[in-house]
Image (cartoon, rainbow, N blue to C red):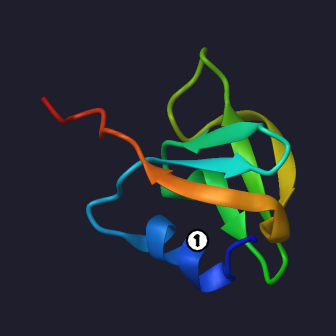
Amino acid sequence: MGVQPQDLLEFTRSRPFQPFRLTLTDGRSFEVHHPELIMVGRTTAQVGLRSPDYADVVYERSVTVSLLHVMQLESLPRADAG
């Protein structure tokens, strides 16, 4: 189980950027709507959780996610997709 940093970086660096969801082994999930809201490390990722009051790249708080516990990476629709 888990993902490699390269797998997550592939999602993060795609152009045009495609928002995605990380689903964890404990059932939690986190959506990444902008590449500046995630920092990928060797064993963890820091995910910025957006504030509804600010632009897409401003986060309210962040969570550290173990890559070992990422069960699924799933693309989400882009905001500009019509």
User: Residue 46 location in percent, x, y?
Assistant: 78, 58
Task: Specify the quadrant that holds the N terminus.
Answer: bottom right
| Residue highlighted by disc 1 | 8
Closer to the camera, 25 or 54? 25
Q: How many marks?
A: 1
Relative to 26, does residue 45 appear above or below in the rendering?
below
Closer to the camera, 26 or 32? 26
Q: To which quarter of the image does residue 45 belong?
A: bottom right
User: Residue 4 location in percent, x, y?
Assistant: 68, 81
Residue 14 falls left or right of residue 26: left
Q: To which quarter of the image does residue 76 belong?
A: top left
User: Residue 36 location in percent, x, y?
Assistant: 57, 56
Closer to the camera, 73 or 49? 73
Relative to 23, does residue 4 appear above or below in the rendering?
below
Farthest-out residue, left? 82
Residue 63 falls left or right of residue 8: right
Q: Residue at x 48, y 51 (%)?
A: 74
Closer to the camera, 58 or 73? 73
The amino acid on which the numbered mark 1 sits, given as a three-letter code, is: Leu
Q: Residue at x 49, y 42 (%)?
A: 33
Farthest-out residue, front? 1
Relative to 4, does residue 51 appear above or below in the rendering?
above
Task: Specify the quadrant that holds the C terminus.
Answer: top left
Q: Residues within 10 Å of mark 1 (few under 14, many from 20)?
A: many
Secondary structure at numbered mark 1? helix
Farthest-out residue, top? 53
Q: To which quarter of the image does residue 39 belong?
A: bottom right
Residue 32 falls left or right of residue 75: right
User: Residue 68 location in percent, x, y?
Assistant: 83, 70
Residue 79 falls left or right of residue 33: left
Q: Residue at x 77, y 38 (%)?
A: 27
